Every structure is written in C-alpha cells, then in structure tokens.
Amino acid sequence: MTSYRIRLREHVLSDADRFCELQMSSPVARYVSWLPRTREQCEKALADAIAQQRSVERVRFFYAVEFQHVKGMIGSVGYTVRDPGSADCGWFLLPAFWGEGHAAPAVRELLQRAFGSGGIVSMAASCSVGNRASVRVAEKCGFRLIAEIRGRAHFEIRLEDFQKLALHGPD
C-alpha cells in the first residue's frame, strides 16, 4: 500500500474554488506583490495552468498540493522556465495550512520533478524577507541565499546541490 502525506498533481477545473481562495487571500497577498487577484483573474490563471499541461512548448509547470487528510488542494507550487535549463519557482499554501510542515515536502517534490524529467539545472526562488516561513522553506530545501534586494530574499539551488542533499541530507 502506498501512503503519502503531501502529493503534487496537475491542476484540474474542479480546483477553481480553492485556487481562487488561495489567490484572493489577504494573508497570502501580504507576501506576494501580484496578489490578490479577482475571481475572474484567478479563473483565467487556472485555465492557463491547465492549458499549459497540453502545450508542446510548456514553460509553466504548476501543481496542486494535496494533503492526505484533506479533500481538495491545500496550495499550489510550480516553476516557470526562463531559459533552457533554468527556472523560477514559487509556493503558496492556504493560510489554514501554514506552519504545519506541508510546504517543504511539496517544494522538494517540485524540485525532484524539475531536476529529474524537467531538464532544469538551476532553480531560483524569491520571497519577502519578512516572510520567515518561506525563507525557512527555501533553506530546508537546500536553496542558497544569493541576495536581498528591496525587501526580497533571492535564492538559488543547482542540480548538483539538490543531488547531494538527496543523497546525504542537509549538512
């Protein structure tokens, strides 16, 4: 029997309510400059994420985060390819699931996909310096802080660092 705590899956139309709740959330928007969105903007973003799944030239890989004891998605993680081999990633959880240890396993699974079959060799991430929880998620997942610019912490992890972390665990 396979068990899971956190699982990533492609977004589906039935994610609309939770997806919109996430992107319309004031607590989430406190840390994300392009949020909150309107319901219409959220639905368009979800439709775009689903359309990307079928695109031959897919550049956006966003996944619903599921927790085994909850019906429906609890968040979203994903990455956007910037150049061949490099991408930017992000993670968002519904506030009801903050502080429960769900983000780091979801980001690790995302990195496994990106560095595995995704062909990525360098992944960047950024978050508000004031968002200590997201800073900690980046650290737990092996990202290196490369700069703090205008209140944002900028991180990077390379394929070889992720592979070492997967083999040996954090230092």
Image (cartoon, grey):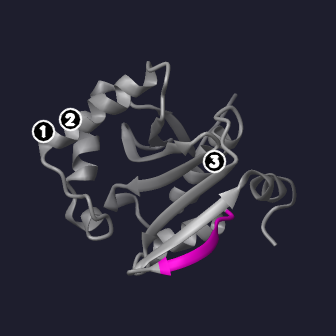
Confirm or deny contact between disc 2 and disc 1 (CB under 8 A): yes
What residue is shown at x 62% (from left), y 63% (from top)?
A: 156
Residue tagged 1: 40
| Image spot of residue 102 (x, y percent) | 52, 56
> Within the image, what quadrant is residue 93 found in?
bottom left
Magenta stretch, main secondary structure class: strand
Magenta stretch: give its range: 142-148
What residue is shown at x 71% (from left), y 56% (from top)?
A: 158
- Check disc 1: other Cα within 10 Å, few if <14, some if 14-19, many if 20+: few
> What quarter of the picture does the N terminus occupy?
top right
Judge whether 69 appears above or below 149 on screen: above
Specify the amino acid type for callout 2: Glu
How far apart marks 3 and 1 lie (CA) works out to 30 Å
Residue tagged 3: 111
What residue is shown at x 22% (from left), y 44% (from top)?
A: 20
Chain-order first, disc 2 or disc 3? 2
Task: Give the number of the disc on residue 43.
Answer: 2
Q: SS at mark 3? A: helix
> What quarter of the picture does the C terminus occupy?
bottom right
Residue 100 visible: no
